[in-house]
Image (cartoon, grey):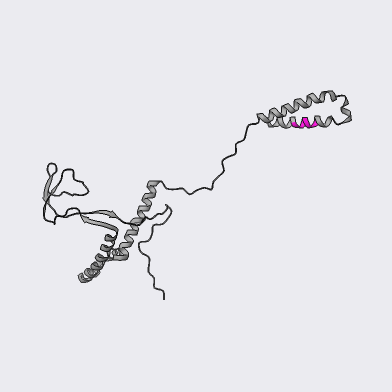
Amino acid sequence: MRVVLIIAVLLLVAVSAAALLPVAQSIRQYLPPATLALAVLVLIGLFAQPRQTLPPPTRAAEPARPAPGQQQAINADAEVIHFLAMLQEKGRLVDFLMDDINAYGDAQVGAAARVVHAGCKGVLQESFMINPLRPEPEGSTVQVPVGYSADEYRLVGKIAGAAPFSGVLVHRGWKTGMVKLPQLLRSAGDALPAIAPAEVEVK
């Protein structure tokens, strides 16, 4: 259709120019109908042209984002490492656990354990509200109720039948009603944060 339209326009121009030439006296009577026919052909061609839709504007390629579940796992990893970093900073827990304590005497290990205990206990109390699951002292006889939660009770010994069970409290268990950890955001490409920086004394 585009080729036909171009030819019709050229013919229309040629016919209009021929009307101005002196040699066109013999064909002058045919020029108006020819001009009208070509003009109609051009109009038909213009309306028959398919409309071209502009492609949507291209956007700069955005980096792939992880799915919500994957993003939560990425953030959880960073939060766990940050909590471990707090235990290291306040209680030197990682230093204590990663060191070979067999090279030290019991008195040295005991002294180090006191520092670790005090520092890590402080971090736990700042980050969690920790309370015993059972208020009774260990060694007491307690009842495990019907419909007990499997994550709150571990039954040992001779277990027969269905709850309620009666037994001796070996460990009171622990629970928390509050978690106060910093919300850390990181992308899939970020490296996990360091637990503790390397300390260098510059001389």
Residue at 39% x, 73% y: name it: 201
Residue at 24% x, 65% y: name it: 117
Q: Is residue 158 among what the camera can see? A: no
Residue at 78% x, 25% y: name it: 34
Tell whether position 10 is magenta: yes
Q: Indicate left or right for 117 with 82 as reference.
A: left
Residue at 72% x, 29% y: name it: 42
Task: Provide the residue span drawn in magenta.
Answer: 9-14
Asked if residue 90 is positioned above or below residue 31 in the image, the reply reads: below
Tell me how many marks there are: 0
Image quadrant for the C terminus? bottom left
Quadrant of res 20: top right
Percent x, y of residue 134 = 17, 53
Secondary structure, magenta segment, majority class = helix
Q: Indicate left or right for 175 with 71 as reference.
A: left
Percent x, y of residue 79 = 35, 56
Percent x, y of residue 172 = 17, 55
Image quadrant for the N terminus? top right
Tell whether position 77 is magenta: no
Q: Indicate left or right for 112 with 26 as reference.
A: left
Percent x, y of residue 135 = 16, 55
Q: Is residue 125 among what the camera can see? A: yes
